[in-house]
Amino acid sequence: MTPVEQLRESMRKDRQWSFMYSMLDLDLDVSQGVILYLEDVSVSFDGFKAINNLNFYVNAGELRCVIGPNGAGKTTMMDIITGKTRPDTGSAYFGRTIDLLRLSEPEIAALGVGRKFQKPTVFESHSVFENLELAMAGDKRVFPTLFARLGGEQRDRIHEVLGIIGLQEQTHREAGALSHGQKQWLEIGMLLMQDPHLLLVDEPVAGMTHQEMDRTAELLLSLEGKHSVVVVEHDMDFVRSIAKRVTVLHQGAVLAEGSMDEVQNDPRVVEVYLGE
Ligand SMILES: Nc1ncnc2c1ncn2[C@@H]1O[C@H](COP(=O)(O)OP(=O)(O)O)[C@@H](O)[C@H]1O
Ligand SMILES: [Mg+2]
């Protein structure tokens, strides 16, 4: 069976429990060191090219920052990776062999591509622990009581994630009572419960205090090496605090790529930002 056939087989409708396939380990081929390949990708909306011959590669275990003025195509790029938007032309591969353009949105999520949207979507009336428990189940309609007898391994994973997101002290608090920043971390934790290979994070620090931003930087940096992470962010101080390699998008294509210093000193980048 090809990886896509394996995935389809594992996601048959008669197998109700999505957590079964969320744990599925497909043959993700990162032998070239690259986990994501977007090549010559274009997409137009009503004749407007939101993505224009984009080439974008992410290495396995890398923490990549993507910046660019409003309308540059950053969110659209994430929509293409996650299967929400189909490009008109070009290719998108997860590892060397998995053709993302042949997969549906839930299939791509099941492969281990997690996405964090700007607005946190935690279950406000459930505790932090229960939120992580629900995320492990993968299916947000399943009530935690169904998992009353969690295995030791699952408990360990929840506690491990609580440590990563720094919410151990809040374990039994209602998620609705958390600060904005804590909710964002909880949501990242919920994505981590699925142990994603690739994590896409859109503007994580919008609305955060400076302290919360520092903590978010630590959190994202701690994921490096274990997960590949793509962070889209407007706040330049924040990007500087976590950036290794930065990609600047402009008019749907890569304008510059390199270290924060390199891209900030690139005259083309300066021009684009001055024009904002
Ligand atoms: N579904 C859509 N329909 C029409 N236009 C869209 C759609 N999604 C994005 N666009 C347009 O594509 C361009 C890129 O948008 P977006 O990817 O959201 O940029 P960014 O996230 O970098 O600010 C914008 O001009 C936006 O208005
Ligand atoms: Mg956006």
Image: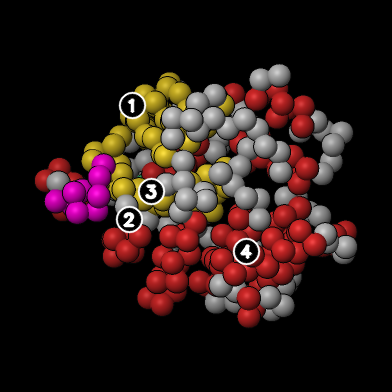
The answer to whether residue 209 is visible is no
Tell which residue pokes out farthest to the left in this image.
267
Q: Which residue is at 55% across, 77% downward?
A: 179
Residue 27 sits inside the magenta stretch: no
User: Which mark, residue 161?
Assistant: 4
**Image disc number at residue 243:** 2
Sequence-wise, the earlier of marks 4 and 2 is 4
The span picked out in magenta is: 257-265
Q: CA distance from mark 3 to mark 2?
A: 7 Å
Q: Is residue 29 above or below residue 239?
A: above
Q: Residues within 10 Å of mark 2 (few under 14, many from 20)?
A: many
| Sequence-first disc among 3 and 2 | 3
User: Are there few (<14), some (14-19), or many (20+) residues within 10 Å of tag 3?
Assistant: many
Q: Which mark is residue 53?
A: 1
> Looking at the picture, how far across and down is residue 45, in whole percent?
42, 31
Give the foreground label among 2 and 1. Answer: 2
- Mark earlier in primary sequence (2, 1): 1
The image shows residue 11 at horizontal and vertical percentages of: 76, 33
CA distance for labels 1 and 4? 38 Å
Q: Locate residue 39: give its quadrant.
A: top left
Report the amino acid beneath label 4.
Answer: Val
Could you tell me the amino acid type at mark 2? Ala
